[in-house]
Every structure is written in C-alpha cells, then in structure tokens.
Amino acid sequence: MAKMKIGAFLKSRIVWMICIACLVSLCVPMAAGAAEVVDRVVAVVNDDIIRLRELNQALEPLEKRIRSEGLSAEETQKQLYEARERVLDELIKETLADQQIADTGIQVDESDVDAAIERIKSRNYYTDEDLRQALQVQGMSMEQYRGEIKSQMLRSRLVNRKIKSKIVITEEDIRRYYEAHPEKYGGTVEYRLRNILMQYPEFGGPEAKAEVKEEMKSVLDELEQGASFEKMARKYSEAGNASDGGELGKFALDDLSRDLKPVIRNLEAGAFSDIVETEQGFQIFYLQDIVKTDPAPLEKVSDKIENTLYEQRVNEKYDAWIQSLREDAHIRIIR
C-alpha cells in the first residue's frame, strides 16, 4: 500500500492518537529560502521507504529551535544528530502503524475529512482563503492537506481499535494512584516570604564583602530590637522588591533552593532568619505566614486521575504494540 505520512505526528510519540486539532500545526509556514536538497532513501521498512525529504521536513522545527539556543558548534551538531535519530525513529514507528491500516479495513469518508477541516478552521479563526494561503506558504496544496488529515484520522481510528478500546480504568486503579501521590492530592503547604538583600561588592575583594556583611549585621540587630521587617526592607534592601517591603510571594519548600530549604523550614510564622549567604548576596528572610490547603477529596479529582491513568496506559500499550511490530519487521537504516 502507499505509505501515508504527516509531519505533525513527529512532535510527540502519540500526537496522532489524541486530537485532530493538532493538525493545525501543518499550517505553520516553513522557513523562507530553505535550501533544496537531493532526495534519497534513508530507511526501508518492510515494503515501504522513508526519504530524506520527509526526514528533513519533520526535523525542520527541531533544527530551528536547536540553532536558536546559542549553543557551541560542537553541542549544536550533537543535538542535531540526536534529534535526527529521534525523528527517524518516529517516522519508522509511523510507517509500521500505517502498514496495519489496510489489514484492519478501517476507512475514513470524505465527509469526515470535510468536518475535520471545518473544525480546524473554526478553532483558528481561519477562513477558507486563510487556510489556502497558509498551505501555499508551506508549499502544500489543499488536496495534499486533505490527504494528511485523512492519514491522521485513519491512524487515530487504528489506535482506537488496537489500543484504546481495550483499556479499562477501575475505581481501585484510581484510588491506588490517589493514595500513592499525596504530593498532588494530599494538600499543600506554602510559605509566604519577604527578604532583605545586600549585594556583594563588584570590586574590593574579601574586605569589601566583609564590610557589606557588617552592614547587614546592623540591619539584623535592628530587627532583633523589634524594627518592622517591611520598613527595614524598604530602607536597606537592594532587591527589586524593596519598595514592596521585600514581598517575595508564596513558595512550597520544593520550589526553594537546596541551601534555603532548611532555613525556611525551621522558621515559625512571624520570625526572620539569620544572615544567609546566597548567590545574589547576603539576605535575611522573613516568614510572614504559612498557608495550608486541605487535601483534595478523591471524588473531586477522580476524573482527572482517570484521564492521567488512561493516557499512561495508552502510551504503554502503544509502545508495546509498536515494539511487537518492529520485532517482526524488516527495517534497514541507510546512512
């Protein structure tokens, strides 16, 4: 059978299993002036082939992101190579899945494709002309786009039949997950913090740093004598939040740095810390209050947990299914 393909599939292992709306990514314009390359076969999967043109098209968004990160030439080449390997692996998985479609008798009517296109246009506020212009920029005709959407829908129905229809999430599954993840559903503890910051001197060495610490000690002395932390922050802090009385906001312990966690954990509401040496400078922290939320009742998070478990099972079963196809397939990668 002719191999069906779609670039958007490669943005995630199971994009094509989740939502036809993801197809709008096909409308993202390609980079202007992209160099034309000589096409060749890069992989053989049973009776189908994967061409260099397909691989480069799928790799393009990842390549743009990697090249925009300002990495060294060596690291850029390393990440591009790794990305190419991942993309080729996903194309092989896609091809293996496509080869199963003919055997299942799954079909998609043209009316289904029409409805999918209308949903995409509606979600993105596209007129028919807007869509055609976006496709033209990408070098794709409407007929090619319809073919991509049809392929997407066929794959989605294949996964529904082979995988999703066989997944059952029980109430016991949901309860076990709930009890195993108290950090998600067992309530939260957050610490509302303020700080006073004195930055390390840019020049002057250890002596200048010691002078700054002496200044901070005098601030600590005033706090110990009952001075308002907010007023002291406005007067002495060199942080950007000084005008707000050193207001930092609320933080869970896990949000804090490793060195700061024990400092805050050992404070009581209304207390301030000793002088703390941080990357930014000398700091004093004030624990304004501790905000606790009650655990989420199981019945209120049951649907969310069920969806989480469902997607996990889909991923697991999809991977196992593709692996079984791979083991029985003839695959040759051409470097």
Image (spheres, rainbow, N blue to C red):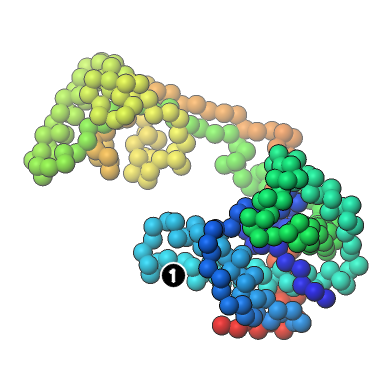
Quadrant of the image containing the C terminus: bottom right
Please state the horizontal and vertical placement of residue 309, each as a whole percent of the image: 71, 51
Residue 62 is left or right of residue 263, and the answer is: right
Where is mark 1, residue-wise? 77
Front in this rendered view, residue 261 or 33: 33
Asked whether the viewer can see residue 244, the reply is yes
Front in this rendered view, residue 333 or 23: 23
Q: Picture quarter containing residue 221? A: top left
Q: Picture quarter containing residue 8? A: bottom right
Q: Residue at x 15, y 33 (%)?
A: 212
Please state the horizontal and vertical placement of residue 21, each as a whole percent of the image: 73, 48
Q: Residue at x 34, y 26 (%)?
A: 241
Residue 11 is left or right of residue 302, and the answer is: left
Front in this rendered view, residue 190 or 15: 15
Please, what secondary structure does the residue beneath circle 1 have?
Answer: helix
Asked whether the viewer can see residue 152, the reply is no
Q: Residue at x 89, y 52 (%)?
A: 111
Please state the horizontal and vertical placement of residue 251, each as a whole percent of the image: 45, 34
Whether residue 36 is situated above or below residue 193 in the rendered picture? below
Q: Residue at x 80, y 45 (%)?
A: 118
Task: Give the amino acid type for the residue marked by disc 1 in the picture.
Answer: Gln
Front in this rendered view, residue 157 or 220: 157
Quadrant of the image containing the N terminus: bottom right
Few, some or many residues within 10 Å of mark 1 (<14, 14–19, 20+): some
Q: Picture quarter containing residue 226? A: top left
**Number of numbered tags placed on the structure image:** 1
Please state the horizontal and vertical placement of residue 134, each as a whole percent of the image: 66, 51
